[in-house]
Image (spheres, grey):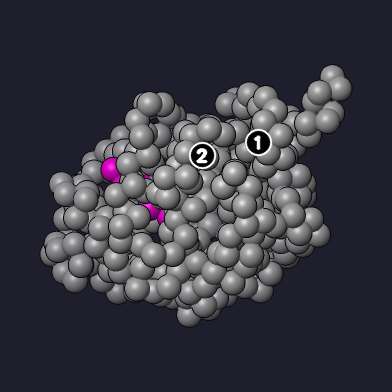
Amino acid sequence: MSKLFSPLQLGRYTLKHRVVHAPVTRLRSDPDDTPSAMMVEYYRQRASDGGLLISESSHTMRSGRGYLGGPGIYEDQHIAGWKKIADAVHEKGGRIFMQIVHDGRQSHVDLTGGTPPVAPSVVPFETQVLTAKGWVPQSPHRAVDIDEIRLLIDAFRTAAERALEAGVDGVELHSANGYLADTFLQDGTNKRTDEYGGSIENRARFTLEAARGMISVFGADRVGVRLSPSGKWGAISDSSPQDTFRYVTQQLNSMGLAYLHLIEPRVMGIETLDENEAPVASEYLRQFFEGPIISAGGYTRDGAEAALQKGNADLIAFGRYFTSNPDLPERLRLNLPLADYDRSAFWGGGEGGYIDFPPHDAARAK
Ligand SMILES: Cc1cc2nc3c(=O)[nH]c(=O)nc-3n(C[C@H](O)[C@H](O)[C@H](O)COP(=O)(O)O)c2cc1C
């Protein structure tokens, strides 16, 4: 009996299958960060009856942008664009959660409106960010003071208020992949000595308070949190990841979230590091989280089914394969071959490699 195609209660919603669209940033927003018409079509194509889509990350504020073309939820004008996406998904009987992020130190002054990118502490690192001038090294970041931290946290709540107005079914806090919340959580990037640094309890405070702010708007049963335990994207590290992620998971467990979303460390951002490595993050953290767990990272149809059968996860999120297979749940259900994804179209561009992948009937007729 396939578990991937069995129903599941996720917070307030009953899903008909467990194939989730992972958040995948595609950088095709309008110039003012409003979701574009192309994006509406992208999500419409990927919605399925009783299926869950998690949106690409949407920014809490202009100075929290790390990629040119990523959508925002920091101005009222963004609401209308998101509403069209939510409506398109609902018309097909699907559900959509909006992922909300502040990109923190993975940014550039050309994206932030001129201000240096922010982080809990100054810890030099190297990455590339996409600006109007192409991929360039990130700008030097600065450490935020405690009053700014409160404002940064509150921006997750106000973003959630706009998301609610846009009519999405829930929100996901992006506390993974080395963006702002993750840099607070892990001690490789957090060297603070105030109440937001030092002990695990202090380092987790940013993520937990941001989650509480989002819960105050949507209710816990419509809020998820994404973590990447032991992930390396964004030059992130922790001296004791098991302790750090156990603590934050236990705290999130007590909040009664709709779900916990875990990225397996066998992928680094968009690269699979080790196909054969078992999904360790969900296996370990399952012990500390009673609600639904979504696991992501390098899954195939068989690997997804195995993880569900083992009980380590309740849903499986697919990133790259969902980009090239708009009807991925149906293809997995019928065990049809999957179309290869087009890396050159991942970040920015037009409709090619974005909304021109045919559904399986059309693909087979070719
Ligand atoms: C082009 C691209 C953009 C991504 N953007 C996001 C994002 O906005 N938020 C996020 O949490 N993860 C993002 N990810 C990571 C995916 O959600 C997922 O964890 C990763 O692709 C591994 O899953 P996969 O092996 O099924 O592709 C992105 C991945 C890709 C390929």
Task: Quadrant for residue 278, please give it.
Answer: top left
Assign a secondary structure to mark 2: helix
Judged by its main secondary structure, the magenta piece is loop
Asked if residue 228 lies in the magenta stretch, the reply is yes
The quarter of the image holding the C terminus is: top right
**In the figure, is residue 94 to the left or right of 108?**
right
Crowd tier of the residue under label 1, counting other residues whose Cα lies within 10 Å: few below 14, some 14–19, many 20 or above? some
Q: Amino acid at mark 2?
A: Ala
Judge whether 302 appears above or below 184 on screen.
above
Q: What residue does disc 2 label?
A: 304
Q: Position of residue 22 (x, y in %)?
A: 55, 46
Q: Position of residue 116 (x, y in %)?
A: 36, 52
Q: Which residues are magenta?
A: 226-231
Circle on res. 332: 1
Judge whether 121 appears above or below 352 on screen.
below
Q: Residue at x 55, y 64 (%)?
A: 10
